[in-house]
Image (cartoon, grey):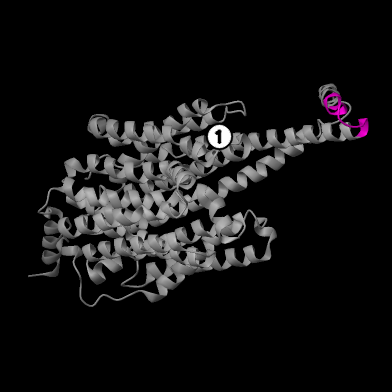
Amino acid sequence: MSESVIEHEEVINSEEWRPSKNPWLIAIPLMASVFMYALDETISNVALPYMAGSFSCSHNEATWVITFYLIASGIIIPAVDFLCKLMGRKNFFMLSIIIFTIASFLCGISNSLIMMVLARFLQGLGGGAILPLTQAIMMESFPKEQRPQSMALFGLGIVFAPIIGPAIGGWITENWSWPYIYYINIPIGFLVLAAAKELLEDPPYAKKQVGVKFDAIGFAFLAVWLVLLQIVLDKGNDADWFGSTWICWMTGVSCVSGIFFLISQLMKRNTLVDLSIMRDRNFLFGTLIQIVLMGVMMASSAILPSMLQSMMGYTPFLSGLSMVPRGAGCLVATIFSAIFITKIGERKMVMSGLCILGLGGLLFGEINLQIALGNIAFPNFLFGLGLVMAMVPLVELSCRTLRNEQLTNASGVQNLLKNVGAAVGTSLVTTCISRFGQVHQNMMVGKLTELNPQFMSRLEFYTGIFAGNTDLASATYAAKGMLYNQLLQQSTLWAYIDTFRLFAIACFFVVPLVLLMKRKNI
């Protein structure tokens, strides 16, 4: 029998494979693991000040807790396909859950920043593989006509969990203590492990293979690229970006390593990832749109609670609670997508979601410092609604034209690039707020002059208030200080407004890419 006939039969068998268990039962441990991993991406954000106090370190040093989690996740994701071939996909999934659970316990008992960072790195290594493995297993386990519903459930997990993470983290931190944000993973991890052992099974192409070779060179280039890139993105704004020598060196080495990684994957055989899937039009454009969506989601989730805490005096719990309407939007969009996606069509659903997300960004651009939680509820609801309406059909649409045996590798590549998009988005948004604030401050400071009658009127008013308790010179000085603080506050607010409007522009910009994707598998 010729090799082409054998390969053709293997493709047919892989496409026809179905698990012996009900796919909706299989989805239970998978979604529990996704929720657990995605929650830990943001649950630590509001607890960083408490960790900094416990470890006697600065807030900037405490951010390494988040940075090393993302670094480890990014490193392990591209190796998912290789590790599945090395030990079998089910075994690798269970090993990931074990590592993640043990690391969560180590995070909770950490008594120093170094121990905490190492534990979070281990947690990222264990959790990084969960998303691509879950995506691949769910797409293979469900028949094609049920994939939109399964991806609606998957999309809910990857979007909803990071959104409610700050609220859960804030409540636990204020009412218990920050270690419990990691301890809650332990019982979930044991339950997921037991359910996975009972329900999961490997298709023929995902079983343990003999003679698998590890692409050590490719992995080394990948690790250097991602580690240095994440450090540059996290610390670049604090170090004045390319005004810092070490940022320049790290950026250069990261870029060179990234180029060598791409060359090694394109030129060698038995590579870490198969980049030939990027030739698939649906996968290419679908991944590009998801990169933008992840950047917008993670960046907006980071700056909104930060704005409420720093500028409006909200507690960590209340600032996290501000994200709950976004979660409600996710739930509504998930139900809507599951029911109407086949009637409306995936491409129309994605474009509608991107437009709704852009509208939410424009509405956030109208905020002011006199708002209450209710005033940001509707834009947040639109954000959640648009994210899921765009993300859910996009995951399935981007992989629709791929064969089943390509899905594990495709999921790894896609989630790697989405992680990079999230890191870049979070870094850019921090820089935008800093730079836009400086621009608006420079524009407004020229108004604080004796030639401006409004400024002089305000100055006289505040001077009169302070003059009741001190001499005229001190009262005038205090009044000028108060007006300057108001200027700083207003310039920072405008920076947030400009940044939210950039989210809208990014969402509207990628809408035409949806039209380049195929409707059906042809």
Identify the residue shown where x is 39% and y is 49%: 39
Identify which residue, 189 or 234, lies in the foreground.
189
Q: Amino acid at mark 1?
A: Arg
Identify which residue, 28 or 241, lies in the foreground.
28
Q: Height in image: 124 above or below 448?
A: below
Q: Height in image: 17 above or below 113?
A: above
Residue 210: quarter of image: bottom left
Is 440 left or right of 195, judged from the image as shown? right
Identify which residue, 348 or 521, lies in the foreground.
348
Q: Height in image: 392 above or below 448?
A: below
Residue 333: quarter of image: top left
| Crowd class of label 1 (few under 14; some 14 to 19; many from 20; radius 10 Å) | many
Residue 444: quarter of image: top right
Q: Residue furthest left?
A: 1
Q: Disc 1 designates what residue?
A: 501
Give yes or no for residue 111 being in the magenta stretch: no
Identify the residue shown where x is 88% and y is 27%: 467
The x, y position of residue 222, in whole percent, is 44, 67
Q: Secondary structure at mark 1?
A: helix
Give the prevailing secondary structure in the magenta stretch.
Answer: helix
The x, y position of residue 227, in whole percent, is 50, 65
The x, y position of residue 211, in whole percent, is 23, 78
Q: Quadrant of the C terminus?
A: top left
Q: Quadrant of the N terminus?
A: bottom left
Give yes or no for residue 468 being in the magenta stretch: yes
Q: How many marks?
A: 1
The x, y position of residue 347, in whole percent, is 32, 36
**Range covered by the magenta-colored residues:** 463-473
Is 301 left or right of 487, judged from the image as shown? left
Identify the residue shown where x is 32% and y is 51%: 34
- Decide if residue 354 is in sight here: no
